Image (cartoon, rainbow, N blue to C red):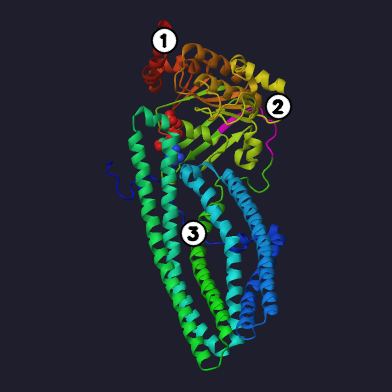
Amino acid sequence: MFGFRRGSVRSRRDAPEASINTPVNWRRLFGYLRPYRGRMALAIGALTVASLLGLSFPLVIMQLLDSVLNQQDQRQLNLFAVALVGIFFLQATFTFFQSYNLNYVGERIILDLRTVLYRHLQTLSLDFYANRRIGEILSRLSSDVTQVRSLLTNNITTLLSSLLSLIGSVVIVFLLNSRLVGFVLVLALVIVGIAVGFGRYFQKFSTAVQDALADATVAAEEGLQGVRVVKSFAREEYEVGRYNAAMEQTLAAALRLALFRSAFGGLMAFLGFSAIAAILWYSGREVIEGRLEFATISGFLIYAIAIATSLGQLSGLYGQFRQALGSVQRVFEILHTHPTVADLPGAKELPTIEGAITFDAISFGYESNLAVIKQISLAIQPGEIVALVGPSGAGKSTLFNLIPRFYDPTAGRVLIDGFDVRTVTQQSLRAQIGLVPQETILFGGTIRENIAYGRLDASEAEIIAAAQAANAHDFILETPRGYETVVGERGVKLSGGQRQRLAIARAILKDPRILLLDEATSSLDSESEELVQEALNRLMQGRTSVIIAHRLSTVKIAHRIIVLDHGEIVEQGAHDELMARNGLYAHLYNLQFRASDNVRLAEVNI
Ligand code: ATP
């Protein structure tokens, strides 16, 4: 209906593909088992006993049948029947220990791996996120991690139990009738050869499913996160179509996998059961020729089934292993990514600063050949309020992001009180910088927790003082549970102005020497605007403030306005000076600030 073609979703994705060639560090992978080696040993021990018991019961059945067919001994029959129940009981008990311990280890590994992965994700620099979709990362954190867990636990134990059962059955068949074992082994080798030949396709097909699923998750994540935009453009059906197109691709990939798996499973079952028929035929011949007891055939049959089942499991396992390998690579690709901005070895703590910021001939480009900031030199004094203005794409946000070292310049230095930001720890640098972003992000917690995000050890009185200074205290008290009211997705909804004031309270509580403020572009009603502006003025007092300005009131209180264009400073000075020059600033003022000011004036008049 929407004309989505195959690959339409993928083409929107600018994220690099999960590299299937990421080398798997086996030591590191199996390192996740190390803390639980005791439990794992217990599980493997229990599994070995359960498998050996499984191997013993056909022997008992043979004895049981022998007591009926040949000896017709009631007492022996009773004894063997009780022995069988005893064996099954013990087998069930050991299987319980094996299963519980295995799941215990599996769940712990999921926790460990997700924690390690999430911690690593938190250390990665912003450029990593600029190139990826969150949905794609989340799918690695959830479904791929589960696959890795299976590889480390269930797959290993299935491998062991199948091998034990296979080797044990072959050995017993050999002891009972050595001629038969050669026959069984030839059959086994043929089946294993076919299984291995097919196995490598599993990884290819299942990686395609995981990739398609990640694309669908991305589509859903975008459609849900941007639900306001979706609704405002009445594009619900379009989004459903986009998600559906991605899911269709997932379906196609999943069906290809299912087709392959079913054909493979069918072939394996056919080969396995044909092998049983062949064994029956062969052992029947042995009975006819008087080389084998009839009762032994039942034992052979059960061992033959055990051999076929083990072979089936082993071949399935090979497929699962190849499938899990794709997931391991997707997880390790993230773990092998190093943050582009990292503390230098021996980086020092930044001492308490005055707040001087110097850009020393800095250049920067997101792509190496495309300079976004060109040779900018600028000194900002402690306590100075600087407004950055310029047309869209001029490089304001980029320049701003170099101060807390979200990115490193490609040339030149950023100095804070004379310290090159690359020589100090990111933690100590960012601890002294307050950032108020354009869009206030509130976390799903109480209002108190959201303000305390600025300083986790703040006292109740400090939190309230910060809220008061941010003009937030009064509206907080009006919410159902005051400071304990839950906000965020599942909590009370706050207005744009209220959210901004919470963000300001957060920054006030942090009490940084340097304030970076990306002014919200969305206009508030004039009363809310005034409350926000008042709170901001309090926040800026006595701090070095760099503001990406969108309001006339801000540019007017700024000590200096820096006008950027195409990554260069083209003008700087106070509002009146720049207006008198009649250059880019005056042009922007007429276009942007005065227009927005008129809007606000109009609101007042209404
Ligand atoms: P606006 O006022 O529209 O926010 P700005 O002045 O803040 O614009 P920047 O966001 O600094 O401009 O962008 C400067 C240039 O860098 C633009 O050409 C933009 O396309 C490019 N750019 C910004 N972020 C990235 C990124 N993560 N990767 C690649 N290029 C980027």
Residue visible at 45% across and 68% down in the picture: 199
Label 2 within 8 A of ligand 1 by Cβ: no
Q: Is residue 371 visible?
A: no
Please tell me whether mark 1 sits on a helix, a strand or a loop: helix
Residue designated by label 2: 458
Circle 3 SS class: helix
Identify the amino acid type marked 3. Answer: Gly
Q: Which residue is mark 3?
A: 326
457 to the left or right of 194: right
In-image side of 117 versus 582 (left or right): right
User: Does the magenta stretch mainly form a helix, a strand or a loop?
Assistant: loop
Which tag is nearer the camera, tag 3 or tag 1?
3
163 in relation to 205, above or below:
below
The question of residue 546 being in magenta is answered with no
Nearer the observer, disc 3 or disc 2? 3
Q: Could you tell me the amino acid type at mark 1?
A: Glu
Look at mark 1 in the image and give the residue it sits on: 603
| Residue 350 drawn in magenta | yes
In the image, which residues are magenta? 349-358
What is the distance, in whole Å, between disc 3 and disc 2 at their CAs? Answer: 46 Å
The image quarter in which residue 217 lies: top left
Q: Along the line of sight, which residue is nearer the eye, 19 or 556?
A: 19
Residue 76, image x, y percentages: 69, 79
Query: Which mark identifies residue 358?
Result: none
Q: Which amino acid is tagged 2?
A: Ala
